Each structure stands twice: as C-alpha cells, then as structure tokens.
Image (cartoon, rainbow, N blue to C red):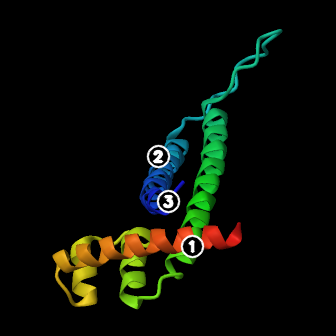
Amino acid sequence: MDIIEQLKRIRLLQNKVDATKEELQSLRDKAYTVQGQAPDDVRIQETKKIHPLEDLLCKIDLTEKKLDDRSWELVETRHNAIKAIFLLQDANEEDLLCRRYVWLEKWEDIAKNMGMGVRQCYKIRNKALKHLEETMAQEAAQSS
C-alpha cells in the first residue's frame, strides 16, 4: 500500500472506530433496559434458553474486542504515517499533512491555524505528497 493510500486509510479506520463505539454504546443502553425473567416452576429436560441479557453481554464482549482491534490498527496506521511524514524536510508540509491526514482536521481549520488560505493549503498538500512519495521511494531504494 503506498503512502497516500495509508494516509487516506486513517480516516476510514477512524470512521470504523467511531461506528463501533456507537454500536457498543447502543448495546450497553439495551443491557440496562432488559427485563429479568421470573423463575418458572421446575422444568424437566428443557433445552437451555439463552437469557436476553446473557446474549447482550456476549455481544458487548465481542464488540469491545472489535473496538480494541480497530483502535490498535488505527494507532499503528497513524504511527506509520507520522514516521513517514517526519521524513519531509519542510515543516509546513509536515504540519499540514499531520493536521489533515493524522488528526483529520478540516481544510478550513487547517488554513486558519496555519494562517493561510484553503487554496494555498491544497498547493502545499500536493507538493508535500509528491515530496513524500519521492522520499519514500528513496528510503525503499536505500533499504534494498
């Protein structure tokens, strides 16, 4: 996967983490509203029924594991992106790429925080991505 795809993947992973958090919260909310079952008279040779709360707790556990996995994948992808971005020589290019692709800021916020227009941010981004691809190609050539 090339570096530009890795940078774009961060947003996708963040969306998956956010969706999983919402799913987990929804399951937890349901767990608080599940009614308990009143004990019935003695039952002989009945197949075991899963209590709705037990089912929800299993789903919560699985969703928490999914959230952990996705969160770690996001952390690793961000870490790799930051390592690559810090290979750039220009501080403005580093700052802009980190703000946009690692911390997922909006273009308007990046422009305001960096004291420039949105169009200028696009120009710096394009130049930075080109420099980043060149730098990554050089790194790959040196390591082989």
Q: Residue at x 83, y 9 (%)?
A: 45
Q: Considering only vertical position in the picture, is 10 above or below 116?
A: above
Q: Residue furthest right?
A: 45
Tell me how far mark 3 sits from mark 1, CA to CA. 18 Å
Q: Position of residue 27 (x, y in %)?
A: 52, 44
Q: Nearer the viewer, mark 2 or mark 3?
A: 3
Disc number for residue 138: 1
Disc number for residue 26: 2
Residue that label 3 marks: 6
Q: Considering only vertical position in the picture, is 75 above or below 16?
A: below
Which amino acid is tagged 3?
A: Gln
**Crowdedness of circle 1 by 10 Å Cα count: few (<14), some, many (20+)?**
few
Q: Considering only vertical position in the picture, is 98 above or below 51?
A: below
| Front position in the image: 63 or 144 | 144
| Front position in the image: 14 or 50 | 14
Quadrant where the N terminus is found in the figure: bottom right
Q: Earlier in the sequence, mark 1 or mark 2?
A: 2
Q: Position of residue 103 (x, y in %)?
A: 42, 73
Q: Earlier in the sequence, mark 2 or mark 3?
A: 3
Which amino acid is tagged 1?
A: Gln
Which amino acid is tagged 2?
A: Ser
Q: Position of residue 108 (x, y in %)?
A: 21, 75
